[in-house]
Amino acid sequence: MKVVLLAGGLGTRLAEETEVKPKPMVEIGGRPILWHIMKQYAHHGFKEFYVALGYKGEAIKRYFLDYYSLNGSVTIDFCSGQLQTRNRECDDWVIHLEDTGAQTMTGGRLKRLEPQLRDGGTFMLTYGDGVCDLDLGRLLEFHRRCGKLATITAVRPPARFGGLVFEGDLVAEFTEKPQIGEGWINGGFMVLEPGVFDYLEGDDTILEAHALERLAEDGQLAAYRHENFWQCMDTIRDKKLLESLWERGDAPWRVWE
């Protein structure tokens, strides 16, 4: 099954990092967050990726070209110009790096991929800036049971501040950034049918505000509730949180090991 990764946004709220690289290339544990997302999909058996490029897309192309060619030991014959690699341990992925325009909106990026996806049946889609411990196989099963054109993953966002439980004037419990019940949001991990392309128009189409709203109005949008870990990387604070989880070996999204 094909997986679309939207990786073309500006990432303005993470400007400290994204002035020199696209947001999906911001690193967690020495690897771009895009790599983490792809490792999760591959763990569940989804290994063909369409990466919708935009802002600084050449950096993503360069990363994956190097990721392939520089893996393992390398021998270079300077006279002939031949390059040989040995002891290569490479992920068995197929990656399509697709230019979808510097200013194109999320729905427009997906629309540009219609020729590659329209005849391929069900496909998955997510953004290049969030991780979770979602079982993608169960998400797909849920989508098929519902029989709708689109399924989103609903998550509860982490609180920005610590949660307090009182006993009189004393704090009985303090929880740092709990996952709280203040409403469900779109967590970004979606399963879509080709019929979704009928809800998309040109480059200015916003997937969320245009297509998903119309799908909901037509009764064609299902939601899979994910109660466990989910975290997007919108700010430097978010990046530091993910980095700290990775460094201490407590990264819930690291399902592949």
Image (cartoon, rainbow, N blue to C red):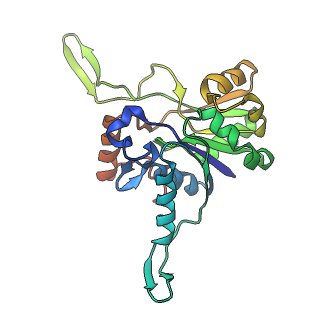
Q: Quadrant of residue 211?
A: top right
Q: In the depicted view, which residue is nearer to us: 46 or 84?
A: 84
Q: Is residue 156 above or below residue 61?
A: above
Q: Residue 229 appears at what percent x and percent y?
A: 44, 38
Q: Residue at image x 47%, y 41%?
A: 129
Q: Is residue 213 above or below residue 242?
A: above
Q: Residue at image x 63%, y 41%?
A: 139
Seen in the image, is 5 located left or right of residue 229?
A: right
Q: Residue at image x 49%, y 42%?
A: 55
Answer yes or no: is residue 147 visible. Answer: no
Q: Residue 165 appears at what percent x and percent y?
A: 29, 19
User: Which residue appears farthest toward the left when viewing the image?
Assistant: 170
User: Which residue appears farthest toward the right when viewing the image?
Assistant: 119
User: Which residue appears farthest toward the top when viewing the image?
Assistant: 168
Answer yes or no: is residue 72 visible. Answer: yes
Seen in the image, is 198 located left or right of residue 60?
A: right
Q: Quadrant of the image for the C terminus?
A: bottom left
Q: Residue at image x 55%, y 56%?
A: 43
Q: In the depicted view, which residue is nearer to us: 174 or 194?
A: 194
Q: Residue 178 appears at what percent x and percent y?
A: 36, 29
Seen in the image, is 30 located left or right of residue 52?
A: left
Q: Residue 164 appears at what percent x and percent y?
A: 28, 20
User: Which residue appears farthest toward the front when viewing the image?
Assistant: 79
Q: Is residue 201 above or below residue 70?
A: above
